[in-house]
Amino acid sequence: MSNLKITELPQSTLPLDGNEILAVVQDGETRQTTLTEVNKPRGLSHTLQDGDTINLASGVFNGYDMYKFSWFGAGGNQNATVTLPDVSDSGRMIRFITDSSFTSNTHARLTSKVNQTIDGGTEYVLNIAYEGVMIWSDGTEWFVIQAKAH
């Protein structure tokens, strides 16, 4: 049943297993991928420093499922603010991890948008080396569904 036009497909089709080849048009060029590849979490590594403010809903930070943070700079209490995307994307999960450059004096403050919460609060702080957290949105608020710290 390969190479059929969409209008020639039978009314009931078999479920996808993830290994089927999909055609994708990118920059006017047709490429191929699989459903498994399309559904893979996308990650971004980023170095934070004191005073940084980033918005995960805009620019190069938009649309990732996993963020690995490193810290640049030393001395004293240091803070960076990371604003979560809008909570209305129901069912979305995002993971955050820190590397060995984090200490108790370096803080990546995950903050929610106005009138949105993370486990009932306005922020979740990452400030330990190799710390991690996974959050999930129900469309109304963010929930911490997994957290680890060393």
Image (cartoon, rainbow, N blue to C red):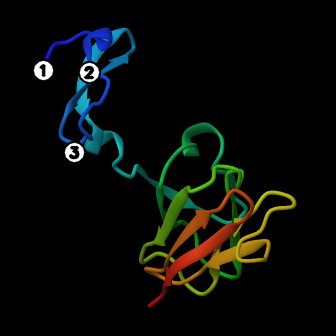
Q: How far apart are marks 2 and 3 (CA)?
A: 18 Å
Give the amino acid type for the residue marked by disc 2 in the picture.
Pro
Q: Foreground residue, 36 or 104?
A: 36
Q: How far apart are marks 3 and 1 (CA)?
A: 16 Å
Residue 84 image-quadrant placement:
bottom right
Residue 72 image-quadrant placement:
bottom right
Q: Foreground residue, 87 or 74?
A: 87
Helix, strand or loop at disc 2?
loop
- Give the mark nearest the N terminus, 3 or 1: 1
In this view, which residue lies farthest toward the bottom?
Answer: 150
Give the amino acid type for the residue marked by disc 3 in the picture.
Asp
Residue 117 image-quadrant placement:
bottom right
Give the amino acid type for the residue marked by disc 1 in the picture.
Met
The residue under label 1 is: 1
The residue under label 3 is: 17
Query: Which of the two marks, 2 or 3, is nearer to us in this view?
Result: 2
- Give the mark nearest the N terminus, 2 or 1: 1
Q: Does residue 8 sit above or below 83 in this rendering?
A: above
Residue drawn at x 38%, y 52% as measured from the top left: 41
The x and y percentages for residue 124 are 68, 75
Q: Would residue 21 be found to the left or right of residue 130 on screen?
A: left
Q: Give the label on residue 10, or none.
A: 2
